[in-house]
Amino acid sequence: MRNSSNRNFAEHGADMIHPRHHSSNFEPLPALEQPDRTIDANLELAARLHGCRDAVIFNDAHIQYGQLWKMVEALAGYLQKKIGLKKGERALLYMQNSPQYLISFYAILRAGGVVVPANPMNKAAELRFLTDATEARVVLSGAELIDNLAPMRRDGVLNDVIAADYRDMADPNCVYPLPPARDDFPDAPGFQEALAAGLTPDPRETAPDDLAVIPFSSGTTGQPKGCMHTHGTAMATVLSNGGWLELPEQCAHLATMPFFHVTGMQISMNVPVFHGHTIVILGRWNAETAADLIERHKIGCWISISTMLIDLLNDKRALTRDLSSLHTLSGGGAAMPKAVARKLEQRIGRPYIEGYGLTETIAGTHVNPLDAPKEQCLGVPVHGVDARLLEPECSEPVPVGEIGEIVVNGPQVFKGYWNDPEATRAAFIELDGKPFFRTGDLAYRDPQGYFFIVDRLKRMINVSGFKVWPTEVEGVLFDHPQIKEVCIVGVEDDRRGQHVKAHVVPVDGADLTAKGVIDWCHEKMSAYKCPKEVVFTSALPRSGTGKVLWRELS
């Protein structure tokens, strides 16, 4: 196995176990020994070991590890000494991907606070929900978003707001787009002002068992819930996912996944910091710009989602770029359609490595082995994860090859939902004396121990008593040469109970009819699985992380 980090890896953490040694008898891989330190201490160590190495490249501006840690210390000092942030108090982080986001994240932790990540697409009512739920009274915000905080500031809900203009840490000559400049922050200190105060934080009081971050679930089964993660649970996925990817000693990562989401936060931000790697930040998704950054900075690792890769493969200008530096291309969130995966492998010469995780597990619990990936597959459980399949809403295990609900136990599993003990109790089941989190996701496992997603427990369509899994139908439709994207939903039907409806995004210039799509499906799969309705649209509704919002379709 290649070196997972650098010559000082022993100081960082644990010996890695190559994924190919994953046992075929489904015994969990042994957990990795975690370093006895907090997440913010990873950046402090990286600054000591790699102070002159680029930590961040953003719109052609370079920030070295030594410089980055000094800014984190200064902001942490400001949060403690000027604002009065105490250990365990929550602070809302409301920015787009930027150096200021990374600095704010680590500064809140260094000050002893707890990060509450907010989607930069959130508006006033959604922000009010987060602040009410967590009692966060401090917000570090992008300057372009500060107006959305105005109602809470008027109502006295917020005590302090620090506003960051991303241009302050970008090369002014860079052509990549940024939000409009803004100099007026009513009653709010600017980010640069906070750094310039030069305040020093008190000695670190936090430990691995202390709360570090409360990301909110997407709310697919009701109101979003805050998932309590400690420095220790976050460190677990930093270790297991970072080691699994077998990253070179020095590697540049392209960060396109939003940092407020656990995949972007952990795998595109915290993993590179742990290893002392360089993070090339793309603030707003653009396929041509992403391809340009891969070529210019010799990107070795890109954690992405299928929608971004579909965009890349459909952008003629992006496809002229040299992408050969990519060592690892990985992601999750939704199964990668076979047709897209094959086009991608032809283009870059490497397979797309799929994985699986949730907000409750702060990123991946399953990843495909790099040397033996399978298509449309979640992979195998990573180090320390005991993953099983149970009869839905029961405790009985299902045999190999049969569909069951994924339940997981491991060091990265959250400590419960914030201020919601009832939901916490309902989310866990005890097996063999261990607590297992019920994911609500349905999958089956093959004889080699690989997990294959079927669908969300709540998304299954019942057609005359037959179960239809939307992802299966979507996978078939993605093979249609004139279909760019598709989302399958169930529609109430007086005769059948439900029937299948397809929302289709055609490729440019396609000549499609609803009847043509339905007839094509009848040639590929059982009649009860085929759409009865087809509607065409220019785009599917998506969340801030790129997931299709299937509940909004009918």
Image (cartoon, rainbow, N blue to C red):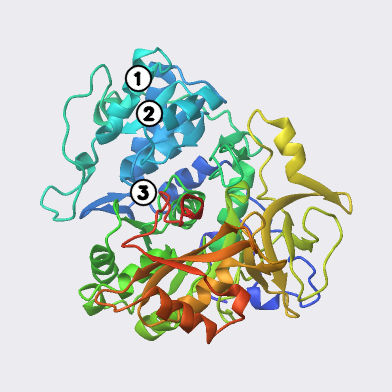
Residue at which label 2 appears = 124
Q: CA distance from mark 3 to mark 1?
A: 37 Å
Q: Earlier in the sequence, mark 3 or mark 1?
A: 3
Q: Look at the image and tell me in which quarter the N terminus lies.
A: bottom right
Name the residue: 48% across, 54% down: 554
**Horizontal relation, residue 195 to residue 264: left or right:** left
Circles 2 and 1: CB distance less than 8 Å? yes
**For residue 241, above or below residue 399:** above
Mark 2, secondary structure of its residue: helix
**For residue 351, above or below residue 151:** below
Residue at which label 1 appears = 151
**Horizontal relation, residue 483 to residue 146: left or right:** right
Q: Amino acid at mark 1?
A: Pro
Q: In the image, residue 434 lies at what x, y percent?
A: 83, 50
Q: Earlier in the sequence, mark 2 or mark 1?
A: 2
**For residue 320, above or below residue 453:** below
Residue at which label 3 appears = 65
Q: Residues within 10 Å of mark 3 (few under 14, many from 20)?
A: many
**Horizontal relation, residue 491 to residue 252: left or right:** right
Q: Which mark, by number, is residue 471?
A: none
Q: Nearer the viewer, residue 99 or 493?
A: 493
**For residue 310, above or below residue 349:** above
